[in-house]
Image (cartoon, grey):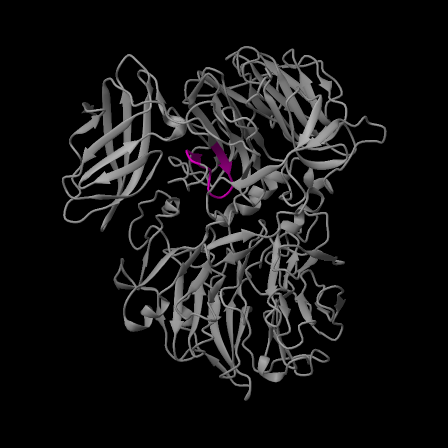
Amino acid sequence: MRRTRILTVLLALAAGLLAGSPPSALAAGTPEAAVTADTYTWKNARVDGGGFVPGIVFNRTEKDLAYARTDIGGAYRWQESSHTWTPLLDHVGWDDWGHTGVASIASDSVDPDRVYAAVGTYTNDWDPGDGAVLRSADRGATWARTDLPFKLGGNMPGRGMGERLAVDPHDNDVLYLGAPSGHGLWRSTDAGATWSEVTAFPNPGNYAQDPGDTSGYASDNQGITWVTFDESTGSAGTATKTVYVGVADKENAVYRSTDAGATWERVAGQPTGYLAHKGVLDAENGYLYLAYSDTGGPYDGGKGRLYRYATATGSWTDVSPVAEADTYFGFSGLTVDRQNPGTVMATAYSSWWPDTQIFRSTDSGATWTQAWEYTSYPTRENRYTMDVSSSPWLTWGANPAPPEQTPKLGWMTEALEIDPFDPDRMMYGTGATVYGTENLTDWDDGGTFAIEPMVRGLEETAVNDLAAPPSGAPLLSALGDVGGFRHTSLTEVPSMMYTSPNFTSTTSLDFAEKNPDTVVRAGNLDSGPHIAFSTDNGANWFGGSDPSGVSGGGTVAAGADGGRFVWSPEGAGVHHTTGFGTSWQASSGIPAGAVVESDRVDPHTFYGFKSGTFYVSTDGGATFTASPATGLPSGDSVRFKALPGAEGDVWLAGGAADGPYGLWHSTDGGTTFSKLSGVDAADTVGFGKAAPGATYQTLYTSAEIGGVRGIFRSTDVGASWTRVNDDAHQWGWTGAAITGDPRVYGRVYVATNGRGIVYGDTAGGGTDPGPDPTPTGACEVTYTVTNQWPGGFQADVRLTNTGTAAWNGWSLDWTFAGGQRVSRMWNAEHTRSGTTVTAGNVDWNARVGPGASVGFGFTGEWSGTNAEPTAFRMAGRSCTTG
């Protein structure tokens, strides 16, 4: 969940990036490497969502034009024809990584081609750069930038309030921006090109989540939180006269100007003791609605109210749907139906348990209904249905006791918008996705409205580690907040994140190079083990045990044969084990906090790095010896990997601007390292399939080479480099992980901090080998229903080769006696004929060796009974059942 997002970012950035701006080059005179460019096609390995969406904005004059903002992953524009989101800020580069955090977004209702984004991730020193306002005249296809003299906080407390940026609906050259950190209210009169402080505005805010926080994160003044124009007080071409502004001040939360911003006054009679998260105006009826919470969110909030302010008379009315004594949450999400302005909706954004709540009124707040209510506790009656088959992991693999349900209606629901042109369409953001409906008004007729994810194309995971095994699934990931996924197809959403246990964030993962079915991951968890193992290539997991003192995942390495592991967790020193972590022994000769990796050939050799020193163990991690190698980076912003298939071949990337920084290579197990000339700076290194005619694997790095920051590829052991990304595809900070694909030449997987897993294929590349002929031989099938609900179920199937020859392609069929139907299948392709289902291999799992297994799963529909199949056939031969 999104509660760990800050930790995710810090883990990613603490390796040196937070100390200052990302370093750009070494000293003058360093020889430049030979650099060329290649044309790549870039896509996301689909997760669909995975992060907090604090803002959704519809244009008020053009149908189907909408934007979404994320806290660290940029902004997006809605594509109505495909019902997908298009990323708009992929051009943000390494030096400006903070501009991937979007504090606010505004769409111009006078000229719908114009859109603006206020960008900046942190207001404390975690982000060394100031904020900026980006402006576009082509709906975000291209941008111009105006730097601000202060920072903005797209990932700071209070980021779900807003919108802080607003365009005057009559004079669209006029914009307002609410600043954090006591910097007040700012205005532009030239369409965002220049900005100046509105010195007449009297209150820069005073609320901080935790004034005692010495990091500057929770102690920052949340400042000016929203700007709303009263469009009834202006005419085309002249500035709107009445403007309302929300301030993070519990005693003075709402201000108004009636002279186009020349003077301002506190709105009389307003409630106190709360922060106004949102201010939404219904100009037709003359009402300003305000959603209040006792804190700034997005995680906290224990009490809240909804108020309606009559703009003509100045009267205030408490229109809260529940009594104050019955709230254990604050209100934030707030919207008005522009086709039926008396219809208002709001969310209980901080109702974590048992679920968020959405309220709806069709009489301007006089009476309310809610999305769910108790019939007899703990039984709930929902006004909605939810279908998450397009993003099945949103169930979290959970089976909670009532009144909790899975999937949840949401949490951190601060973004809520009814389409101004379609009363039936509503979208809302959560801590993990964007949900929506297209039959909302069925709510009012006593029926149910259908909710489903409306998030495809919006990829917002923060990536900590990546692995591409030589067999099995093509990609394994370690992600913040949602743990990570086993991608059996890059173009489909995985069925579930890693479970048993579910880490809040996975910090490191590895597989055994000679036995890729053996996988290990380490991560963070409030209660439970911080390490887990898999023996089926990451499809299923079981938790290990923790050494004493472990507080976080750290890094972990699997021996080449999968028989031993070395773990460097947070809170404890480096440890090693044989087997699957039932007991751990402390390693000697290596300091706590070292980064650990394994040799990919010798199962007894492991490596470590800490504070400029490389360490080597040749006894399975029991003892380490410091390498005599000198000249390596002195800090801990280092990542290194050993080359598959070549014992003792190690590549190391990292450093800082004030010391050694670049890419190093060792061919003697780390005893000596040579620094590659011309690589000005490098932060990651990975390997992929060798180029045609080459014998050495392809190298990939996120680096600065030849004075250019980018993603680079080398097919000649680093002698020359090819930049494979371009200025339109930079994704901010890409320093966490990179790996090539061992099966597809040219394919590279890149970790981003908020734009998910991006992967690139060279022009004409990316073709995976196809399946071979259908196998023959003995087989065994295990069929397990893993989840069941009224009318639906989920099942896993494991097919084992019990013969003596390998299969090069397979096809399995069975009959459903209860008339069940498969809705969606993963890790296999399926067809149906009557009650018979046929499942066949996909490209990556066609080959199944003797004694090996392949697994796939599906969701289905049932009525009456859900009896399990009793007979399975492969190539006309019956399989035994397990």
Say which residue appears at 37% left-offset and 40% top-offset. 495
Q: Is residue 362 left or right of residue 412?
A: left
Q: Nearer the viewer, residue 394 or 306?
A: 394
Q: Is residue 247 left or right of residue 281?
A: right
Q: Quadrant of the C terminus?
A: top left
- The percent coordinates of residue 764 (x first, y second) are 55, 33
- The percent coordinates of residue 20 (x first, y second) are 74, 42
Q: Nearer the viewer, residue 264 or 259?
A: 259
Q: Is residue 882 left or right of residue 765?
A: left
Say which residue appears at 73% left-offset and 79% top-offset. 262
- The percent coordinates of residue 772 (x first, y second) are 36, 23
Quadrant of res 229: bottom right
Q: Is residue 390 above or below residue 582?
A: below
- In the displayed image of the protein, which residue is found farthest to the right? 29
Q: Is residue 544 visible?
A: no
User: Where are the magenta residues, as a range?
Assistant: 476-489
Residue 486 on the magenta segment: yes
Q: Nearer the viewer, residue 309 or 675?
A: 675
Quadrant of res 30: top right
Residue 381 on the magenta segment: no
Q: Is residue 569 visible?
A: yes
